[in-house]
Amino acid sequence: MKTQTFVLICDLRDDEEAIQAYVECHKAVAPEIIESIREAGILQMSIYRWRHRLSMILVGDENFTFEKKAALDNANGRVQEWEAFLGQYQTNLPGTPDNWRWQLMDKIFEFNA
């Protein structure tokens, strides 16, 4: 199976209480949210944190698109609740539009042994 890998970044509010609340939310993600991730064609998703900066590594199947995921998310009330809840802890990255949370990064280097 062919896969696609994406890296995205997001900033949390630079507030220790908000950061810890966000981390806690991800210790027990609801099964409906996990299923929505799977349904979108995502095979693996990891989020890493350094201070208030987040990095997400997302591996999708060959049919994954961000447009497909957005359409599925918009049609799923539980996902909309989850995103709104998490939004209280997130903030815009410099230079992004209002309410723009996760930003796709461009790959500039790759090494394969």
Image: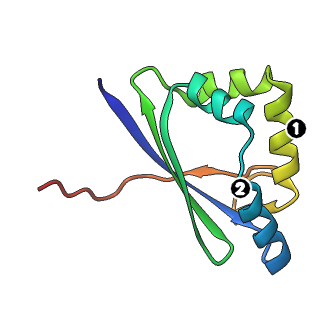
Which residue matches tag 1?
81
Furthest-left residue in this view = 113
- 52 with respect to 41 (left or right): right
Q: Amino acid at mark 1?
A: Glu
Name above or below for residue 86 compared with residue 93: above
The x, y position of residue 15, in whole percent, is: 82, 78
**Image quarter for residue 59?**
top left
Which quadrant of the rendered structure holds the N terminus?
Answer: top left
The x, y position of residue 36, in whole percent, is: 67, 28
Q: Nearer the viewer, mark 1 or mark 2?
A: 1
Q: Secondary structure at mark 2?
A: loop
The x, y position of residue 37, in whole percent, is: 61, 32
**Image quarter for residue 81?**
top right
* Disc 2 residue crowd, few under 14, some 14–19, many 20+, Cα 10 Å: few
Q: CA distance from mark 1 to mark 2?
A: 23 Å
**Image quarter for residue 21?**
bottom right
Which residue matches tag 2?
96
Q: How many marks?
A: 2
Q: Secondary structure at mark 1?
A: helix
- 82 with respect to 35 (left or right): right
Name above or below for residue 6 compared with residue 34: below
